[in-house]
Image (tube, grey):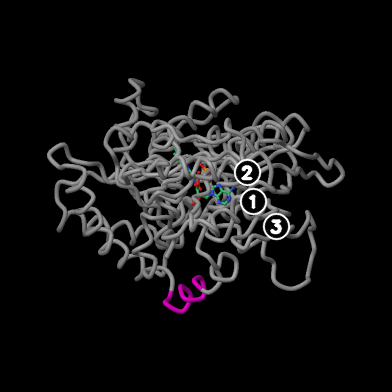
Amino acid sequence: MSSQDKVEKALLQVFDTSDIRLDPASLQIYAKDWTTYYQPKASAVVFPRESAQIEDLVRLCQKNRWKLVPSGGRTGLSGGAVAKDAEIVLSFEKMNKILDFYEGDAQIRCQAGVVTQVIQDFASEKGLFYPVDFSSSGSSMIGGNIATNAGGIRVLKYGNTRNWVTGLEVVTGQPKRLQLNNGLLKNATGYDFRHLFIGSEGSLGAITEAQLQLTRRPLSQTVALLAVASWEDILEIFKLAKKSIDLSAFEVISELAIEKLCSASKIPKPLQTNPKLYLLMETESYQSESTPALESFLDEILTHELASDGSLSQNSQQAAELWSYRENISESLAPYKPYKNDVAVRPSQIPSFVRDLEQLVKERYGGLEVVWFGHVGDGNLHVNILKPDSYSIEEFVELCRKLDSEHFKIISKYRGSISAEHGVGLSKRDFLHFSRSSEEIQYMREIKKIFDPFEIFNPGKIF
Ligand SMILES: Cc1cc2nc3c(=O)[nH]c(=O)nc-3n(C[C@H](O)[C@H](O)[C@H](O)COP(=O)(O)OP(=O)(O)OC[C@H]3O[C@@H](n4cnc5c(N)ncnc54)[C@H](O)[C@@H]3O)c2cc1C
């Protein structure tokens, strides 16, 4: 019997034939996320329908020394859901039910494989709002969002996924099934393991169910897109805005990002001028179709000469059009095989951090094109280096990893983060020490040993 037949025979003790895939195409597809630099190699893909099957699967893994890679929508950007060492991929695709709606608490309980946008739409049907949002929401799953503590475009107002998780069910590597916090808003009874699993990137066990808080739905969003000459001016605008308006988003897009997007999508540039930076600001309103506060704030900015040009949405369609310039950047860069970094410093440090990094690239990595964009109001910048045609993928990655070491030294100088919201996964693992002390990393290892003593879940990721 071939080794694959043996794996299948054992998996059939837990799963129906239709919930196991071993064909080469599925092994390729499910062993990958959005990163392009790892060679996928999985030994099987399984699709549990309920938590009990995951407990049985963990027992099989203990017996056969198998490893598992939990897998959601595979939109991750750090290789966290990549299987490259013959692991079994544990896909949550079929655990996709919304189980309960608790109207009095404005909460839902759902399985981990519900797609983020399905949760947003469900909340909307109930007259409520699930505010965590980003351009991959149509494919990412809530389990993956929780495992990465996903952020997105409105963190400034609503915070990360962590803020919205009131309960979790998890299966650990022992296996034990734990119910964590049960939807409570107050619970001062010792360590809150829920928060350990949030952001654990599949390394402590499987997140099988989640209870989520919903909130009041804003009636409308008003969006302004402004032409700004420098990062210093962006910071000035941010300082003024903090004092006078309630921002829900504050995003920056570099000129090169707009250029690549417009030429890939064959759309006109959004403004008449060609500024160094585009600033997208959003406010939300619970009363009417527009927010006069943003309009008068724009007057203030123009009076201070902090922006040279701008466009203000007059309705939701125009707001969506302005957002599309920000949301479609990642897809438009994909053909350039960008090497991505997702870093954070405090917002006030952004101008000097950008200056330092631009200088490093210019002096030591001349010729590389760097595309900047990101959630600048959270201090979070996406730094995308485009692959020059003359480089093979291997040469390019080698060069970028060399650059990473110098880039992350700069991050370290600012006491920033080498991964603001995409996680550590495989791609940032070797650089974790730039953001976390050796004592902290040792504590992480010890915590993993408690929940996953046989190292079944996502070995080799994070540290
Ligand atoms: C175009 C684009 C835009 C993006 N924008 C943002 C953004 O603005 N903000 C942001 O934070 N991210 C963003 N991302 C990254 C990504 O969408 C998020 O990290 C998302 O949360 C990943 O969810 P997923 O279901 O795709 O997880 P996957 O990629 O499948 O997995 C991510 C990690 O979670 C683990 N995991 C998945 N499911 C489970 C589970 N049930 N139990 C335990 N572990 C699990 C995996 O093992 C892996 O380590 C973007 C990605 C793309 C492609």
Magenta-drawn stretch, dominant element (helix, strand or loop): helix
Region of the chain picked out in magenta, as a range: 437-445
Instruction: Give the amino acid at mark 1.
Output: Asp
Residue appearing at x 66%, y 32% in the figure:
220
Q: Nearer the viewer, residue 398 or 300?
A: 398
Q: Nearer the viewer, mark 1 or mark 3?
A: 1
Residue 296 visible in the snapshot: no
Residue 244 location, x and y as percent?
A: 60, 51
Q: Which residue is under mark 2?
A: 14
> Neighbour class for label 3 at 10 Å: few (<14), some, many (≥20)?
some
Residue appearing at x 70%, y 37% in the figure:
218
Q: Is residue 339 above or below residue 434?
A: above
Q: Nearer the viewer, residue 222 or 87?
A: 87
Q: Quote the CA–CA distance across marks 2 and 1.
A: 7 Å
Q: Which residue is under mark 1?
A: 56
Q: Quote the CA–CA distance across marks 1 and 3.
A: 11 Å
Looking at the rendered structure, which numbered label has been put on residue 177? 3
| Residue 409: quadrant of the picture | bottom left
**Labelled pair 2, 1 in contact (Cβ < 8 Å):** yes
Q: Is residue 59 above or below residue 5?
A: below
